[in-house]
Image (cartoon, rainbow, N blue to C red):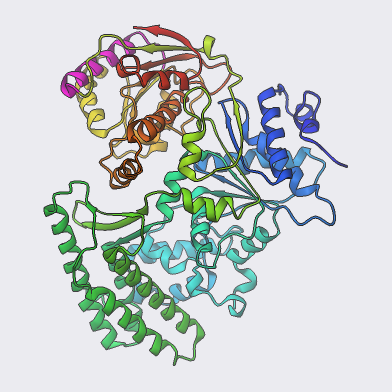
Amino acid sequence: MTLSVNDVLADDGYISRRLPGYELRQEQLEMSSAVANAIQNGEHLVAEAGTGVGKSFAYLVPSILAATQRKKDEPRCRIVISTHTISLQEQLFQRDIPFLNAILPVEFSAVLVKGRGNYVSLRRLKGAYERSTSLFETEEMQQLQQIHQWSQHTDDGSRSDLGFSPLATVWDEVRSDHGNCLGRRCPTYDDCHYYKARKRIWNADILVVNHALFFSDLALRREGASLLPEYQVAIMDEAHTLEDVAASHLGLAVTNGQFSYLFGKLYNDRTQKGILLEHNLIECQQLVSRLRFLVDDLFDRIDVWRNESGHSNGRVRRPLEFENPVSTDASELAMMIRQYASKLESEEQRINLTSNADRLDGLAISLQSWLKQTEDEAVYWVETSAGRNRNVKLLSSPIQVGATLRDELFSQTKSVILTSATLSVGKQDFSFYRDRIGLSKANELKLGSPFNYKKQVKLILAENMPEPGENPGKYEQAVASRIQQHLEELDGGAFVLFTSYRMLRSCSQKLNRWMVEQNRMLLCQGDGVPRTTLLERFRKDGNAVLFGTESFWQGVDVPGDALKMVIITKLPFSVPDHPLLEARVEKIRENGGNPFTEYQVPEAAIKLRQGFGRLIRTASDSGTVVILDPRIRTKAYGRIFIESLPECDLVIS
């Protein structure tokens, strides 16, 4: 039996027969057909689909059909679906895929892929449990006991099934680890949760992953390894985040905390615990103590340089000519551990020591690479975190990921489908997005939302506001006043979206007393409360006001009356004070371009659309979006922002 997307999604299709209240959305059918054609013809597709189109069914249905209806002589069509947020991943795997599996007359298998470190290693757990007194303090031993009890009845074996968040020191001793694995020689191989999951992955038609794991796999493929099996189709949902996620996973990250953590595992002279003590490796213990001092000294010197260099953002524009005894001594320690391990009869002890030696080598190489700036066309910088346990991070990232994605993703994969509600800028232009990710040839599809924004949304553009760049203090005062004015007229909850924590805190202080007088809950991001908890309180209250920054502009779903207004305090321009953004702007300028019009305006327009999109999540939602930044009306580029938004009931206030 051969099915088409029409058979599944049309008015009298499989979904309508099993899903009460289902209505055909022409946009969904159009997107599904475009995805099916791209997979069949081996083409790339950029598909923008507004809120309410039902993107997940639009790409899941043709994916399932392509994976299950190939001819006998055709090669297997394995499909990877990657998302940015956990919430979408859970929606796909817990709701959408099981529903389609139940109603479609085809057999297919789908697996939620987790990184190896998410799974417990039964062999390592047993070893840690037996050596717990030499490894852990009291709290850690209690957690190890809990994990040991859990391991005896869990079917999944992954950390998400554990029921609590273990300390990193505990989980690191019991998790599955490529460098500390005996494979088929392991006595627990037949019961291994990771290898059971691996078998399911290799046999599955549909693999659901997150962007972080997808790009970790892409980075490994450059070195001849991989996390995922070969796939023919990659579908990237929430694809507007692609450039930034790719950049973060194709660079370097070395911290003094990574060294300290590893040294603590090897030898802790305060607690007299560690692997080296178990084997009585006195010389290696002494070298660990020396390395602790060397690491502190080197990272302190880098921190001092950062404070005295004049680069407030921590950017390092040329290799630092610091002596690096850390990498030399760490490599020597790794060699000494390997030499000792090679003489051991116990394969388990041998591989445990060797895996730690490999980590030492990896950190040594990364540190040297960062100091010497060995990668061309990359930006390097230092970040520090204050507090009792000061952490110094040495980071690098490719300035442009387009060339890498072109060579290692688009050229290597038969069909890549990129979809999001926000990919274009202005009326219908994907050129900014495609240029940033290196996609030269692709089909394009832009679909509006089935929602009636003209009736459902009032868009208010503020009048008589100060220019934010001319007098920031006066602008903040005016913003706080306007927020209060709009909240006074509102029956329901509101998001107030900021572009900086500083302005968020300033407005919070100005409005806090008034909010108390109104007996209205004010929730502020950055107060130490997790984002999920803030959202839960917001939804439950129904009349709360939530002040949020970066992470609340996207990926947040609050349908219904709990959210009736979104106030955008400022157009979300990325200020190029972050080293990576600064380097991107400089690169555009070097190439003769205009960074503001070519990068900052289109990037901000896409982000504005994300913020706008928080309001209307269903066909029955309604409310108001308020934009307080006057530049959307007073500057020539403001037209691009307005054209990027759906057509609404526009009011100048």
Q: Residue furthest right?
A: 1
Q: Find residue 51 and report its image quarter.
A: top right
Question: Does the magenta segment cover residue 619?
Answer: no
* x 44%, y 89%: residue: 342
Q: Is residue 392 above or below residue 137?
A: above
Residue 206 in the image: x percent, y percent? Answer: 67, 50
Q: Quadrant of the C terminus?
A: top left
Q: Is residue 52 visible?
A: yes
* Residue extent of the magenta highlight: 470-492
Residue at 21%, 57% in the rendered image:
390
* 339 left or right of 3 in image: left
Residue 311 on image: x %, y %: 17, 49
Q: Is residue 48 above or below residue 380?
A: above
Query: Which of the 4 image quarters holds residue 199?
Result: bottom right
Q: Is residue 479 magenta?
A: yes
Q: Residue furthest front?
A: 592
* Residue 317: % across, % down: 24, 55
Give the main secondary structure, helix, strand or loop, of the magenta stretch: helix
Residue 165, compared with residue 615, is above or below; it is: below
Residue visible at 43% across and 54% down?
249
Place of residue 226 in the rendered image (x, y in percent of width and height, measured from the top left): 56, 63
Instruction: State the residue in front, 318 or 460.
Output: 318
Q: Is residue 375 left or right of residue 178?
A: left
Screen quadrant of the N terminus: top right
Q: Quadrant of residue 56?
A: top right
Left or right: 202 as drawn, with respect to 566: right
